[in-house]
Image (spheres, rainbow, N blue to C red):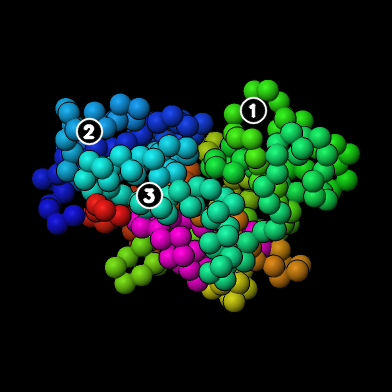
Amino acid sequence: MSRALDDLNVAVLMGGLSSEREVSLSTGREVAQALEALGCRVSRIDAGRDLANVLSGRVRPDVAVNCLHGVWGEDGCVQGVLETLAIPYTHSGVLASALAMDKDKGKAVLAAAGVPVPGGGLFDRHEVAARHVIDPPYVIKPNAEGSSVGVFLVREGANRPVAEVGADDWTYGERVMVEPFIPGAELAVAVLGEATGPRALTVTDITPVKGFYDYEAKYAPGGSRHVLPAALPAPVFEACLRLAERAHAALGCRGVSRADFRYDDVKDDLVLLEVNTQPGMTPTSLVPEQAAFVGMDFRELVRWMVEDASCPR
């Protein structure tokens, strides 16, 4: 965006329709407050299926900051609405959003680009609930959800699979991703898609206070401990940065993204789990923390996001 921020009418899209609605509302509140402090006129929009009418009717924004997470807001659907309305917006465009959200297709693109990804694959959820489709330990996750929603860890020696995946009230799709569990460190790298190319910020080592890095560990205050920069061997640290940048570029991401890794220091095995094109901006989120570490405070990060907005993406 070439106009001054205090001359902009900014729509902050938040809430939405997915299971990650509460996280999105938190992200949206933080971003909206930062934008108001920067002098923008802000319209907070709880995005529903009438979004196109709201944006083209009473709001008519100069730019939209996409603070939606999960299905519909992160998978290319809302991006398509914004493209149709020709509203400049933040984060990734239609194709990159759809690819990154679909774990199976995203892994195929990343593997083709030389990024190490886990094995496993997609399986019918009823089959997964009935038997071990791969040897434990393994992880079950919805193919198109984020924030560790619907994720289960089946530990080594488990006698039974996860019955919940086959339940009648399961709402995360008929096919689920099953991947070998990779022990070791949980790592994350934020990437800013700048004009000169993707720039990785640093590496965070994440330790859940209990269990594994699930929804509660990600968003509950005190749910996990973050160490940055991560205390890794220099070649591994550098590999995280370069692979995160490569993944951002391979998927065609724009704006800010976050790559999530596992590193097994016994086998010296570094694997990229997934790329998040709409990373959280909540008080416990990793991207604002990494930005602050490299000297970019929250308002500066939000300013960068708005100035990076464009259409088409």
The local secondary structure at tag 1 comes to loop
Give how far apart the Cα atoms at labels 2 and 1 are. Answer: 33 Å
**Quadrant of the rendering where the C terminus is positioned:** bottom left
Residue 202 at what x, y percent from top left?
Answer: 48, 64
Residue 100 at what x, y percent from top left?
Answer: 49, 52
Q: What is the quadrant of residue 128 in the picture?
A: top right
* Position of 263 relative to 136 (above/below): below
**Would residue 258 appear left or right of 107 to someone viewing this image?**
left
* Position of 117 relative to 218 (above/below): below
Which residue extends farthest bottom?
235
Is residue 113 visible from the viewing direction of this image? Answer: yes
Which residue carries the number 2 mark? Answer: 55
Extent of the magenta region: 241-263
Query: Counting other residues with Cα less than 10 Å from the Cα at mark 2, is it few (<14), some (14-19), or many (20 or more)?
Result: many
Circle 3/circle 2 CB separation < 8 Å:
no
Residue 159 at what x, y percent from top left?
Answer: 89, 39
The local secondary structure at tag 3 comes to helix
Which residue carries the number 1 mark? Answer: 170
Query: Which of the marked residues, 3 or 2, is nearer the chain's N terminus?
Result: 2
Circle 1/circle 3 CB separation < 8 Å:
no
Residue at the spot 65% in from the left edge and 40% down from the top edge? 175
Front label number (3 vs 2):
3
Query: Counting other residues with Cα less than 10 Å from the Cα at mark 1, is it few (<14), some (14-19), or many (20 or more)?
Result: few
Q: Amino acid at mark 1?
A: Trp
**Quadrant of the rendering where the N terminus is positioned:** bottom left
